[in-house]
Amino acid sequence: MSIALAVPNLLGNEGQYLQECISTTFVSSVGPFVDRFAAQLSSESGAVDSAVLCSGTVALQMALEGLGIGAGDLVLCPTLSFIATANAIHHSGARPWFIDCAAQDWLIDLDSLEAEIEAKTELLAGGIRIHRATGLRLRAIMPVMIMGASLDFDRLMQIAGRYDLRVVVDAAAAIGARASGGRRLCETGVDAVCYSFNGNKTITCGGGGAVSSANESLIARIRHMTTTGRVGRDYDHDIAGYNFRMTNVQAAIGVAQMERLEQFLARKAALAQAYAGLAARFDQLSPFPTPAGGRSTHWFSGFWLSDPGLSDQEAAELSKGFRQHMVAAGIDLRLFWKPLHLQEAHRGAPAGRLDIAEALWQRIYPLPCSTHLTEEELEQVLAAAECFWRAPVKGK
Ligand SMILES: *Cc1c(COP(=O)(O)O)cnc(C)c1O
């Protein structure tokens, strides 16, 4: 059996809580675990309230729509992200504006973002900021906490304030992260923090997502939108809403997972350290960056091919060789996210310069990071990787 990249760790109270759902018949979208899970998330995020939903993608979309962002609007986001970031913007009716990542931390490049806004937008009467080439109105930033990395929230909020932009954080894989000074994510002034509980995330519900916020009325609005816009107990609906709720069954798994969040984060940090230790022994490799300030959660860890002497072509070939070597050794290794501006699905979206992400994405190696990966499995991964980099197989 091969060692997978990230599989759920369900060794806590998950089974017991699921059995409770069955024995009480609360298997649908109402039930005690839904409320308990929302309360756990609010407490973890420093939020006033949280809406638990059926996926992380939907959480991002609902946060935007709940803030009144949609058709005719533009949302800045990093190109180095999972496709869901751009899809959520698209489904809200808005369009993404892709920004490069910064070389030092792989997060959205705030210098480039500011330069882009300065160069390509103008402020009209009434405080409306228009992107000149498309005529769309610039409304929000959706930064992504890549690999669970913390962000420079202070600088982000300064920029958002200067240009009157809402901030919806794609924290899909960053549960447990902190801003500088130990602040919880909703204590930073952002409008909303969105999580995913897909099977490969630090905390899973099987599938699911959530929006946490310090803005109580935003969460109330999102609950209303995602509960078919129902008013009262009869079949009265005041908006064309969605059915995007999480079920009590999903939340039951989530509650059990949250009970072990700190334990999961500690294991993830130890795995990141082991992979960083290996990377340190080879000139060509570097660990994934961990931004200064705040707490990063090492959702994924591994190392990357940082050798500046390699062309993109040479790097891609070496990466292919490493992948084949690891897969042959029984270890799951895939390419990391292909930048969003290179995706057919979002062709033609506005974009700034994108060369950092373009050069980087094929050099990133996420290694197995399940929280119950055994020491023997970790040794197997480290030994297989070491064997390759000590005698790299040159691409032909
Ligand atoms: C997983 C993920 C999502 C999407 O979450 P789903 O629950 O799969 O819809 C969005 N953004 C990022 C960065 C992710 O890693």
Image (cartoon, rainbow, N blue to C red):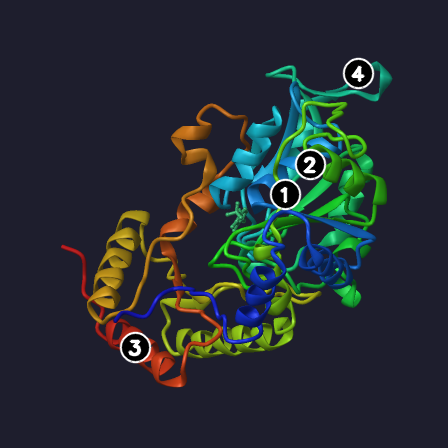
- Element type at marker 3? helix
Q: Residue at x 53, y 63 (%)?
A: 299
Please give the residue where the numbered disc 2 appears in the rendered image. Answer: 227
Among numbered discs 2 and 1, the one appearing first in the sequence:
2
Instruction: Tell me the CA gap for discs 4 and 2.
Output: 37 Å
Q: Nearer the viewer, mark 4 or mark 2?
A: 2
Please give the residue where the numbered disc 1 appears in the rendered image. Answer: 245
- Decide: few, some or many residues near mark 4? Use Cα within 10 Å; few <14, some 14-19, many ≥20: few
Vertical position of residue 113 compared to residue 278: above or below: above
- Decide: few, some or many residues near mark 3? Use Cα within 10 Å; few <14, some 14-19, many ≥20: some
- Element type at marker 2? loop
Report the amino acid beneath label 3. Glu
Among numbered discs 1 and 4, the one appearing first in the sequence:
4
Pointers 2 and 1 in contact (C-beta within 8 Å): yes
- Element type at marker 4? loop
The quadrant in which residue 58 appears is: top right
Q: Nearer the viewer, mark 3 or mark 1?
A: 1
Mark sitting on residue 323: none
Among numbered discs 4 and 3, the one appearing first in the sequence:
4
Q: Residue at x 39, y 29 (%)?
A: 344
Specify whether tag 2 is near ligand 1 (CB below 8 Å).
no
Report the amino acid beneath label 1. Arg
Location of the C terminus by quadrant is: bottom left
The answer to whether residue 96 of the structure is visible from this angle is no
Please give the residue where the numbered disc 3 appears in the rendered image. Answer: 386
Please give the residue where the numbered disc 4 appears in the rendered image. Answer: 124
Instruction: Tell me the CA gap for discs 3 and 1.
Output: 45 Å
